[in-house]
Image: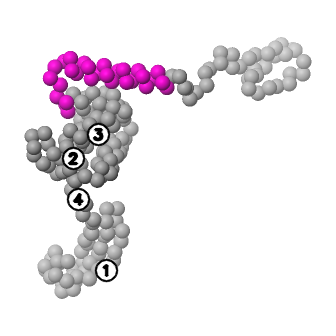
Amino acid sequence: MRCPHCSYEESKVIDSRDAPDGIRRRRECIKCGLRFTTYERIQTTSLMIAKRDGRREEYQKDKLTNSIRMACVKRPLPTGTIDKLVEDIETQLHDLGKSEITSAGLGEIVINRLRVMDPVAYIRFVSVYRDFADVESFKDAVEALETAHRNTNASTEKISPQLPLIKEEIKTVSRSRGRRVRISPAIPMDLGN
């Protein structure tokens, strides 16, 4: 490793630790004694994006994150949702095992994820990504989303995770001496009658 001060090519490793994205090594130059830090990282194969016009471009995480952030502007999403979405998309891309994907393929992955995550962000992303020719094609996309949303709501209404409310959950019972006692039907009480 070349010393950043005197450019001597030999150094010794003083300390070596695991870092989040590789190995951190503390080194000392044998000639001048300067201590410096180096990082050893695994070089992954870069993913190439094949554009519609035939160009090839290296995948850029920031570019994908920014396009999703623009679609999600002023949406009530929990902090970190977009970063998690981008990580999930990257994992899916690496699981494909290909060194190249079309921009249309990447766009469809994003669209499918946004459709589930946030309908408004989905419509925003689709309107830019698909570059609708007219209002009718945009209207068709919104109607398709509404239909899918209604079908999802209809299926979740059939199987509700909560019990329905009982109108008379708490009954009031009269006792002698004019006092009233409240009892719940779930907890039986002996009133001594």
- Under circle 4, the secondary element is loop
| Disc on the earlier residue, 2 or 1 | 1
Do residues under tags 3 and 4 come within 8 Å of each other at their CB atoms? no
Q: Residues within 10 Å of mark 1 (few under 14, many from 20)?
A: few
Q: Which residues are magenta?
A: 128-156
Residue 101's mark? 2
Name the residue carrying label 3: 109
Image vertical order of residue 86 relative to residue 126, above or below = below
Q: Position of residue 130 (x, y in %)?
A: 19, 30
Amino acid type of disc 2? Ile
Mark yes or no: residue 63 visible. Answer: no
Q: Is residue 146 magenta?
A: yes
Q: Rounded to the nearest whole Å, what is the CA distance between mark 3 and mark 4?
A: 21 Å
Amino acid type of disc 3? Ile
Q: Residues within 10 Å of mark 3 (few under 14, many from 20)?
A: some
| Disc on the earlier residue, 3 or 4 | 4
Closest to the observer, 92 or 185:
92
Mark yes or no: residue 86 visible. Answer: yes
Q: Residues within 10 Å of mark 2 (few under 14, many from 20)?
A: some
Image vertical order of residue 38 relative to residue 124, above or below = below
Q: Closer to the observer: label 4 or label 1? A: 4
The residue at the far bottom in this view is: 31
- Under circle 2, the secondary element is strand
Name the residue carrying label 1: 14
Image vertical order of residue 113 relative to residue 180, above or below = below
User: Which residue: 20% across, 38% down?
Assistant: 104
Name the residue carrying label 4: 45
Amino acid type of disc 1? Ile
| Disc on the earlier residue, 2 or 4 | 4
Q: Quadrant of the C terminus?
A: top right
